Image (cartoon, rainbow, N blue to C red):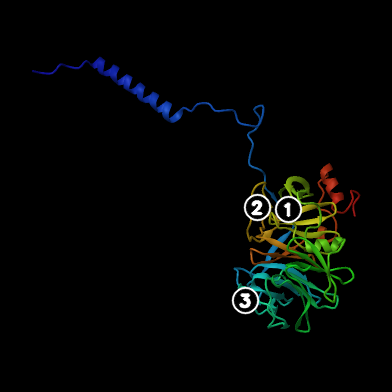
Amino acid sequence: MMGRQVSPRAVAVVTIVLLGIIQFAYWRLLVYREPGPPPRGGGGGPIPTAPPTVVGRTDVTVETLAGSEPGFQDGATWQARFCGPNALALAPDGALLVSDSRNHRIRRIGPDGQVTTLVGASEPDGPGGSSLGPAESTQLCYPSGVAVAPDNSILISDTGNHRILRLQSGQVTLVAEGGAGKPLRSPGPIAVGPVGEIWVRQADGSVRQVSSNGLVVAPSSVPPSVRAALGEAGEPIGAVMTASPDGNGVAEPTSFRIGTRGPAVGSGEIRIVPDVTHHVLLAENTGGSLLLAGRRTEKVSILGMDDGTGARASFAGPCAALVAPGGLAYVADYEGHRIRRVRLPQWLVDGGAAPVTGSRVNRNMRRRFGRNDRGG
């Protein structure tokens, strides 16, 4: 018996229904979305974007003077290796002195581009040691301060041994010694005051003054230049940082805040200051703090070892800065295991202000960073 013949009209109706079901399912499951709450921003305004990034200046240049991967090696600057450099000083002959903390040494970067060891015989990146005598056999333990005295001897904070030492004529001698229960404990950044007195900042942030015969006292006051050289001087932590839009022009106030400052040894009214918290470099005077090199965002600190202009450069733990003659500054980049050299713009070297754009804010910042609106 032959089957019943299916009506073409029925086939068409069934096909149309099936296509409708498929189209509905596609729309409902894959395309359609329930309307959500309106975007925040108030009154249908623009949708908030990620916080801006501020950058250092394009007329600043940052380059690696010495160091690369962590390690210990003397030689030409391009060969040399450091491990945790954390303090700087300038010798009378123009050499740069470096406290190489995790190698337990004081190193010298000469004007001829050679890196040598001045003091230290402990195993590099080891536990350190404790001894005195000839510089080449003296053992240190995590030194974190170096300075040059008026008589050209070199003062050293031997942090792990709670000692202040002096290098003179190739011999290392004891200036002061502390420890548990004593006035001197874990000395760090060290500086020489206006009349040759020795100042040191301890790990707990307290400051001590050390006499030439080893007497350690807690001073009632500290000169501003000394406090800057020991770190934590300048505007309060959390003060507003200023920055130049796109790295050019006069600085304007930003929403970014200043963090913990590292030691800054400088000349003149403007200091080059490392912001240890945010891994950037600031130019600072009594009127404000300008982002000079490095990058900042609202929530993320940008770490790196990039060289280039101040707008492109990055740091990894800049913990000490030093201003030298000739428009140069040097930075001890602790986690980068490098010594960085910064070429400063002439307007900053001259103690003036960045180029003026004419706005009221820029005129105010110009007054804050040197010259008034009438020029010169």
Q: How many marks?
A: 3
**Residue 259, label in figure:** 1
Mark 1 vs mark 3: in front: 1
Query: To which quarter of the image does residue 346 belong?
Result: bottom right
Query: To which quarter of the image does residue 114 belong?
Result: bottom right
Element at label 1: loop
Q: Amino acid at mark 1?
A: Gly
Q: CA distance from mark 2 to mark 1?
A: 11 Å
Which residue does the numbered mark 2 point to in the structure image? 301
Q: Are marks 1 and 3 in contact (CB under 8 Å)?
A: no
Find residue 177 and report its horizontal and vertical position in percent: 76, 74
Which residue does the numbered mark 3 point to in the structure image? 73
> Few, some or many C-alpha atoms within 10 Å of disc 2 (few <14, some 14-19, many ≥20)?
some
Q: Is residue 320 left or right of residue 48?
A: right
Earlier-in-chain disc, 2 versus 3: 3
> Few, some or many C-alpha atoms within 10 Å of disc 1 (few <14, some 14-19, many ≥20)?
many
Q: Amino acid at mark 2?
A: Ser
Find residue 376 and report its horizontal and vertical position in percent: 90, 55
Q: Amino acid at mark 3?
A: Gln
Element at label 2: loop
Element at label 3: loop
Q: Is residue 17 left or right of residue 321?
A: left
Mark 2 vs mark 1: in front: 1
- Most foreground residue, 183 or 237: 183
- Most foreground residue, 253 or 301: 301
